[in-house]
Amino acid sequence: MKAVDRSWTVEEMVLLLQKLSFFQGLPHEDLEFAAGLLAKLTAKDGECLFRQGDPGDAFYVVLEGGVELSLSHPSGGEEKFAHRRPGEAFGEATLLHGGLHSASATALGHTVVLRFDKDGFQALLTNNGLARRLLTSLARTQRALDLRLSAQERLRSKAKADALDLRDLSRVIQRGLLPRKAPRIGGYDIAAGTSLGEGAAGRTVWDHFELSGGSVGLAAFNVLGEGLPPAHYLVVARSLVRELAQDQGDLRGLLARLNSGLASAAVEGMEQFVEAGVLLPSGSGVEWAGAGRCPGGVIRRTGVFQEFTSHGPPLGMLGGFHYGTQRLELGSGDSVLVLSEASQGIFRGAADLVASLHGKPVGEVVSTLQKALNKARQDVEPDISILFARKQ
């Protein structure tokens, strides 16, 4: 297999990408982004792109021709188990795990593939639209594997060893979604963070957004249910809230549209929804909107605690639902705490800890709280986002 000289322009490659199912529907800027990361390779009929046991070093999308995936058995013989046609991807699972290919890939006829190396693959994961396509591709691979296992018991032991752990990808994308720093909001000290346990499912992130009037809000998201990797819904929620906020002036309207968007993005047969705790600090207080069970509340400078209420079901569960909001006035030194997920007992304990840290820098408060939450949940991998705001 040899690389074709990169003599095309970005626009020429964008036109090619638009014809492939993996890239169809993506905005022009996402296609330009992908076009700048790839190399185009050709292979003759029967030529091997990589062999079972080779190190995984690239992610591929078929442009022309086709690719056959096959397994070599220790007892001898080869089993052909899948084909990749134009627009379909392969190689992502091995690249994600950083291990060896569990199958061989062979060209069917004259074949052209688009190749993204390790750095290119990591760059794809930072792009919301492309990350969603990768998640969809991986989910289809996992579903096909599950069907194969149910039909062919003899492959079960090997497939269990090689099966794709979609949680790994979810954690990678979760890390890419997290903001590098908290936003600046006049009159407030802001800090936020997400615990990133190595065995966690990657179900939560925090984010910030700007409404059309210039107000800056904070959000904590937590994905409920099993099915697609949780990062699929985190990407959708983060993309929607940032996009919709640009022409939305209030939290009620934003939550209603975000709920409708997530309901539309639901995958049939998979009961997965997004809990959200949303804060809008401004003027002399904060506005709160809760979807699901993200706990939040105000810790007064005096130590008095006032818990927020939920305003409806998780996002995406009930299309057309309209969420209410709650407004609370704050005095100097009063704080607001939101967790993406926690039992009432753990949340009350977290609020007590915050009260005992009055006067500490907000970053130190969040760091101390993260350590305490991790210790309190030793039976499970930490996967919690924290929003913290203190009125100056």
Image (cartoon, rainbow, N blue to C red):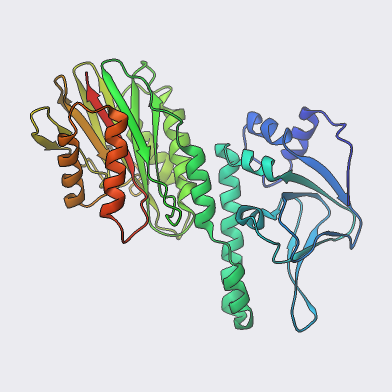
Based on the displayed image, in which of its 4 quarters is residue 70 positioned? Answer: bottom right
The x and y percentages for residue 365 are 26, 34
The residue at 57%/37% (across/down) is 126
44 sits to left or right of 152? right
Q: Is residue 103 above or below residue 171?
A: below
Q: Nearer the viewer, residue 302 or 257?
A: 302
10 sits to left or right of 389? right
Q: Nearer the viewer, residue 15 or 74?
A: 74
Q: Is residue 4 above or below residue 36?
A: below
Q: Nearer the viewer, residue 336 or 267?
A: 336
364 sits to left or right of 81? left
The x and y percentages for residue 304 are 8, 34
Q: Quadrant of the C terminus?
A: top left
The x and y percentages for residue 323 are 26, 37
Q: Is residue 7 above or below residue 53?
A: above
* Tally of numbered discs: 0
The x and y percentages for residue 36 are 73, 32
Based on the displayed image, in which of its 4 quarters is residue 355 positioned? Answer: top left
Q: Nearer the viewer, residue 107 or 57?
A: 57
